[in-house]
Image (cartoon, rainbow, N blue to C red):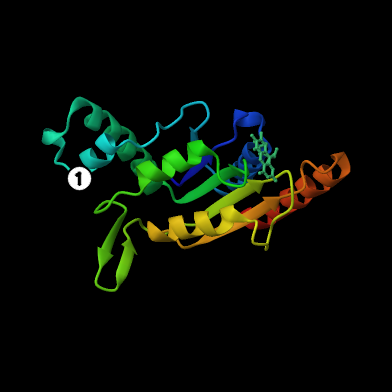
Amino acid sequence: MKTLLVIKSSLFNGSGQSSKLAEQFAAEWQKRNAGGRVLVRDLAADPVPHLSAEAFQGFGLPAGERSPGQQAAAVISDSLIAELRQADAVAIGLPMYNFTVPSTFKAWMDHVARVGVTFEYTESGPRGLLEPKPVYVFAARGGQYEGTEADTQTGLVRNFLRFIGLPDVQFVYAEGLGMGEEAAQRALAEAGQRIERLAA
Ligand SMILES: Cc1cc2nc3c(=O)[nH]c(=O)nc-3n(C[C@H](O)[C@H](O)[C@H](O)COP(=O)(O)O)c2cc1C
């Protein structure tokens, strides 16, 4: 049985445009993977805490030597990493908030990057330790940034995923959502068509 992991990071949970696009992709994916399982991680409904020094130091300790706080942080980190490992494909709903990724998504990144678990440094540089799998990012934005220097998300997310072993990343943009109803509807329709082609 195949598994699709859907990570949502809109403040507005399921009603965010990025969440709706990720859900649309999940529905298409399910049509093509009968019996497949969709696992949802909603970072607004169930936020990952900010990473603390205590938690970070605990990641490097054997389980038996962690403080209760370190143990709790490791449980969160382990479960986020286990979800990624289980998945055959990953869909991420990614709004642009104040020129970057949602802070909830950054907290997720901070708990997923674990030396010796999701990446390691070798003599020739960093090596990702997750098994490669396709990742689809549904980027919803009020303005228009694709292909410009102001697109601070695409490089960040692509580099991060490559770092942990996931180099196969495709972005679907829905841009200009704050630029009037007509522009928003056009962008969402184009993103929807792209999703149908992606899932095919
Ligand atoms: C707090 C906040 C900050 C935002 N900052 C930006 C921004 O920096 N650039 C931009 O293009 N749109 C910005 N927007 C608009 C969102 O990108 C747009 O509403 C998008 O649909 C958000 O995705 P969501 O609907 O999945 O939450 C912002 C929206 C909010 C609520």
- Tell me if I can see residue 30 in this picture: no
Q: Residue furthest right?
A: 182
- Counting the numbered discs, the total is 1
Numbered disc 1: secondary structure:
loop
Residue closer to the observer: 143 or 20: 143
Residue beneath the point at 50% across and 48% down: 90
| Label 1 neighbour load within 10 Å: few <14, some 14-19, many 20+ | some
Extreme residue in the bottom direction? 124
User: Which three-letter amino acid code belongs to the residue tagged 1?
Assistant: Gly
Of the 4 image quadrants, the one containing the N terminus is: top left
* Residue 172 image offset from top left, x and y in percent: 65, 54
Q: Is residue 60 left or right of residue 174?
A: left
Against 148, residue 54 (above or below) is above
- Tell me the quadrant of ligand 1: top right
Residue labelled with disc 1: 60
**Distance from mark 1 CB to nearest ligand 1 atom below 8 Å:** no
User: Residue 166: horizontal and vertical position, in percent?
Assistant: 43, 58
Relative height, residue 67 to residue 161 (above, below): above
Q: Residue at x 77, y 52 (%)?
A: 190
Dividing the picture into quarters, in which one does residue 162 lie? bottom left
Question: Which quadrant is home to the C terminus?
Answer: bottom right
Q: Is residue 62 visible?
A: yes
Instruction: Name the residue rendered at 39%, 41% in the picture.
Output: 83
Answer with left or right where residue 13 lies relative to residue 55. right
Whole-percent x and y of residue 26?
Answer: 59, 42
Residue found at the very far left of the displayed protein = 64
Front in this rendered view, residue 171 or 110: 110
In the rendered image, residue 19, in percent from the top left (x then y), is placed at 62, 37
